[in-house]
Image (tube, rainbow, N blue to C red):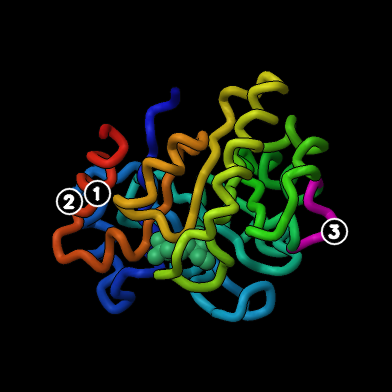
Amino acid sequence: MKTPVIAPSILSSDFARLREEVDEVIRAGCDWIHIDVMDGHFVPNLTIGPPVVKALRQHFQATFDVHLMVESPERWIQAFVDAGADMLTVHYEATPHVHRALQMIRECGRRAGLALNPGTSPDGLSYLLADVDLVLVMTVNPGFGGQSLVPSTLAKVAEVRRMLDDAGRHDVHVQVDGGIHPGTIRQARDAGADVFVAGSAVFDEPNRALAIEALRAALRE
Ligand code: DX5
Ligand code: ZN
């Protein structure tokens, strides 16, 4: 089994103190920083763009995991690469040219992720198995932090892990995002996830080191 990766989502952080918030979770021992990009079209919310990623990059070496919840993400890939993204995840539902979008990310020398909404079948992944470094199984409908995990998504985590393993893609990460907290993380792990995004479970807690440790402890139980 892969070493678990904890990726706090800065969506739930205090944006007025963004640099300190990121600093705190890095010091608290998180693995990646998950950055939620929303365009007000693909999802009903607006968040962060390339200038914010670029500004954070000046201060941190950590892996920046950029989750693009935007329509036609291929329009934005180069800008986020230039801003300092290490990995970019695009939604299957966001473009008719998802294969091209994944190729563009890899041609930029970055790791490519494919995200599936709760209502999206993993069937399309069978044509993209060679083109991904990560599959993000959304465990909530994207757009907002603080929602409850949709239970039916856990079976999809297992199915995606099986598809990847059957294709010999043991190296590819399976990420879960939404509703992950100490009470749900173990189920996601048991289903086959190895990268755990947590927004409110980390940033709504006053002590981020304890919050991250609570997630790791639940994985060890
Ligand atoms: C939802 C975002 C998530 C969100 C998770 O659209 O992709 O990354 O911040 O928040 P929690 O962990 O609070 O469900
Ligand atoms: Zn996300």
Q: Position of residue 129 (x, y in %)?
A: 74, 33
| Residue at x 55% of width, y 57% of height | 67
Q: Amino acid at mark 2?
A: Ala
Circle number at residue 212? 1
Residue 97 versus residue 29 in the image, above or below: below
Give the structural element (helix, strand or loop) at label 2. Answer: helix
Q: Position of residue 2 (x, y in %)?
A: 44, 26
Residue under label 3, please give it: 96
Circle number at residue 56? none
* Nearest-to-viewer mark from 3 and 1: 1
| Residue at x 74% of width, y 50% of height | 121
Give the structural element (helix, strand or loop) at label 3. Answer: loop
Cβ of mark 1 under 8 Å from ligand 1: the answer is: no
Residue under label 2, please give it: 209
Q: Earlier in the sequence, mark 3 or mark 1?
A: 3
Whole-angstrom CA distance, mark 2 to mark 1, is: 5 Å
Tags 2 and 1 touching, CB below 8 Å: yes
Q: Residue furthest right?
A: 96
Whole-angstrom CA distance, mark 3 to mark 2, is: 41 Å
Q: Earlier in the sequence, mark 3 or mark 2?
A: 3
Q: How many other residues sit within 10 Å of disc 2, few (<14), some (14-19) or many (≥20)?
A: some
Q: Is residue 160 left or right of residue 220?
A: right
Q: Is residue 186 left or right of residue 172?
A: left
Q: Is residue 96 highlighted in magenta?
A: yes
State which quarter of the image contains the N terminus: top left
Tags 3 and 2 touching, CB below 8 Å: no
Q: Position of residue 124 (x, y in %)?
A: 80, 44
Q: How many other residues sit within 10 Å of disc 1, few (<14), some (14-19) or many (≥20)?
A: many
Q: Is residue 110 highlighted in magenta?
A: no
State which quarter of the image contains the C terminus: top left
Residue 78 versus residue 44 in the image, above or below: above
| Residue at x 60% of width, y 61% of height | 68
